[in-house]
Image (cartoon, rainbow, N blue to C red):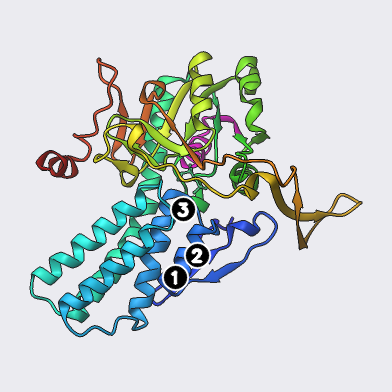
Amino acid sequence: MSTLQAVKYSRGSLQVLDQLRLPHEFHYDEVATSEEAFDCIRSMRVRGAPAIAIVASLAHAVELHNGSCQASSASDVLSYIHSRLDYLKESRPTAVDLTNAINRLKARTNAVAADGKGPEEIIRTYIEEAEQILDEDLQTNLSIGAYGADWLRDTVLASPEKKISVLTHCNTGSLATSGHGTALGIIRTLQARDLLSHAYCTETRPYNQGSRLTAFELVHEGIPATLITDSMAAALFALQKDKMNIAAVIVGADRVVRNGDTANKIGTYQLAVLAKHHGIKFIVAAPTTSIDLETETGEGIKIEERKKEELTQISGAIVRPDGSVDATETVRVATADQKIGVWNPAFDVTPHDLIDAVVTEKGTVVKNVDGQFDFSGLLPERWQQVVAR
Ligand code: MRU
């Protein structure tokens, strides 16, 4: 079975799957400049915290490889690279992976420049570092899958012969990362270990990452799965019988701050409240690149607000009278009075007290006896930098 790939990269060339056309059409766009990457991210042709960071980092690697930097001194090359990265950082504000990738790329290029290396060496270092960000992501996700499946097996599996059902929100799979996925990666690993009874995915209004992307990935992987609307979660949690006996909600993250408060796709918070009410575990799957130790609590997270048309209009492929889907034609239709006022935050913040575990590639973090998350042991270097400020 072929694996879905959000990004195809070889040195000097980056192709990005246009996720706006999914699930009906598979089309890759060539992304060769920072401007094209900015537009691709802002328009959500690529989305998902890790994938955004990967596309931004690699697009600049491609333009550097293709000779976009005309500067001849090391300091001019550095300021060129850093200014392009600062520009890319503005493409979407909430996911911290992009900021963390940019900080890493700046630190690495600063270090070679401080070593007295010249323009060519700085550019080569940038490209190699960006490629490493891509390569590391897949390994990271496989580890998250393993740690998450271990934790669920040890925490919620009633007996060794039983399997568990889970619910996930938004899309955190291969399409949001370099492969395997984070929350969806845990579901994949549960399935691979024969521990999964059933996966439920929410539609994820208004942008429908659940119905357009996660449902597509689950079908593609042959994972037993059911799609529900966001408003059906409480009814599902209340049933608690057979495959509908949900043991855990597993979500991704755009930013986990120091106390564990987590920004993720709008609708995550209400699922956490519902999970608590029904005694269902609530797990955040997040690479350490999604952790922001600088920000103390969720109140410090900037939440992106998007345009009203995402609520008042929708596009999709034509369904012919015989029920077949004609992907050659997509149409945009109005679903509400176009004059209605709209509030469209893309993310919400789930307070840490509603979260049972944060699963990272370095291990699973649970709250201490005081009910607090502590990520300092997981990220000692970054923690030292925070303390030193
Ligand atoms: O607006 P999106 O589609 O970029 O939002 C994506 C999410 O909220 C994901 O849950 C998060 O980025 C984690 S992806 C591994």
The magenta-colored residue range is 184-200
Which mark, by number, is residue 35? Answer: 1
Q: Quadrant of residue 288?
A: top left
Which residue is depicted at the point 48% across and 59% down? 41
User: Where is mark 2, residue-wise?
Assistant: 39
How crowded pointer 2 is (Cα within 10 Å; few <14, some 14-19, many 20+) is rated as: some
Query: Mark 1 touching mark 2, by CB under 8 A?
Result: yes
Q: Residue 123 at x, y = what percent?
A: 25, 75
Q: Amino acid at mark 1?
A: Glu
Q: Residue 381 at x, y = what percent?
A: 15, 44
Which residue is depicted at the point 8% across and 75% down? 116
User: Where is mark 3, residue-wise?
Assistant: 179
Which residue is depicted at the point 23% across and 62% down? 106
Measured along the vertical axis of the image, is residue 13 above or below residue 170? below
Which label lies toward us, 2 or 3?
2
Q: Amino acid at mark 2?
A: Asp
Q: Quadrant of residue 222?
A: top right
Mark 1: secondary structure: helix
Measured along the vertical axis of the image, is residue 260 above or below residue 188? above
